[in-house]
Amino acid sequence: MAIPPERFRLALLHRRLAELQKEQNMVLLAFNRPCEQYGNQRSVRPAVTVATVAIGAFFGGYITKKFKLSPRMFIVVILILHAGQIVFGGGVIFVGCDQPQIVGPNMPHSIPINMTDDCHCDPKDYFPVCGSDGRNFHSPCYAGCKEVVRNGRMYANCTVIPDGQASAGLCPFECNTLIPYLLLNVLGYASGSLKIMPMFLATIRSVEDRDKSTAAGLKSVAASLLAFIPAPIVFGNMIDTSCILWNSDSSRKGSCSLYNIAELRIGMFGTVLIYKAAALIFMLLALWKVWSIKDWEELRKKKTDHMKMHGDAEKAVSMEHK
């Protein structure tokens, strides 16, 4: 007995929402590790994303029900929405903040200063401080600070800073990219959620009723094998390779203290675009297969004729009476 399509739609909606949440969490992991690249995006972005996906999934189902789309138009709509995801996702690569310049040891994106001989500063000791002159320092040692006040929150008698004052942490800096970043994300997730129902219906209408559950299961297995299982490995390696300074000792490798923000952003979203481009190729192949089919009845008739040619008469008769 075939499972009702309504149950398929509900199950797919829940699974797709979970898939988008996993994708969002992976990207958020990359952007929350660097030094507050987008300011208050930690609290704003998840709320905006979840609302966008929910609304997009609803309207995607409404549009699918309202308009009787042919097999060709189903794939065309999916292609357009997927292309929108690629365009908006590519735009996010160019939206970012500048890497903070730090005075300290000779390493990428730093302003070198030689304090090793006089003060015996260890480059591995990363504890950034903000000088009163607006410069960031790798640690109080590289700022020449000799006194600690307010329980380590302030430093005094810093020989490299004109008035000798510094505070813990990096200096505040302007980054006005939150709005365009959120806008591109909203448009990208809206495109992705709008195609949830068209993709699901295109899948189950392309197989027999008794094979619908198998088709949905195979699709889920393929997504797990090709995306969710390798994703932590691929993106984890991407995050690690963008690290500038590791917090480690002689016995083990610790966490990353400082990231190359631009390299991380390009690597993360660039990898996502590569996967989406590969998916686009298979969608074009699907469009080529259904280009000459005007409606679903014609597709059903072609499948029936194909089964008759290969001697599966019982199954063909069953399809003709549906």
Image (cartoon, rainbow, N blue to C red):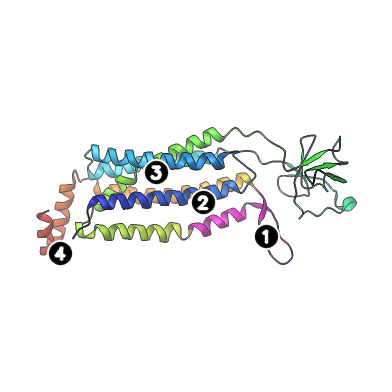
Distance between mark 4 and mark 1 Cα atoms? 62 Å
Residue range corresponding to the magenta coloring: 231-259
Distance between mark 1 and mark 2 Cα atoms? 20 Å
In the image, 239: left or right of 273?
right
Q: Where is residue 149 in the image (x, y as percent from the top left)?
A: 83, 43
> Which mark is drawn over residue 254?
1
Distance between mark 3 and mark 4 Cα atoms? 39 Å
In the image, 316: left or right of 68?
left
* Residue kind at label 1, given as amino acid type: Gly
> Which mark is drawn over residue 310?
4
Residue 82 seen in the figure: no
Residue 5 seen in the figure: yes
Distance between mark 2 and mark 4 Cα atoms? 47 Å
* Residue kind at label 4, given as amino acid type: His
* Residue kind at label 2, given as amino acid type: Met
* Residue 257 falls within the magenta-colored stretch: yes
Q: What element carries label 3?
A: helix
Q: Earlier in the sequence, mark 3 or mark 1?
A: 3
Q: Residue at x 67, y 60 (%)?
A: 254
> Which mark is drawn over residue 192?
3
Q: Which residue is drawn at 28% across and 58% down?
A: 215
Say if mark 2 contacts mark 3, CB within 8 Å: no
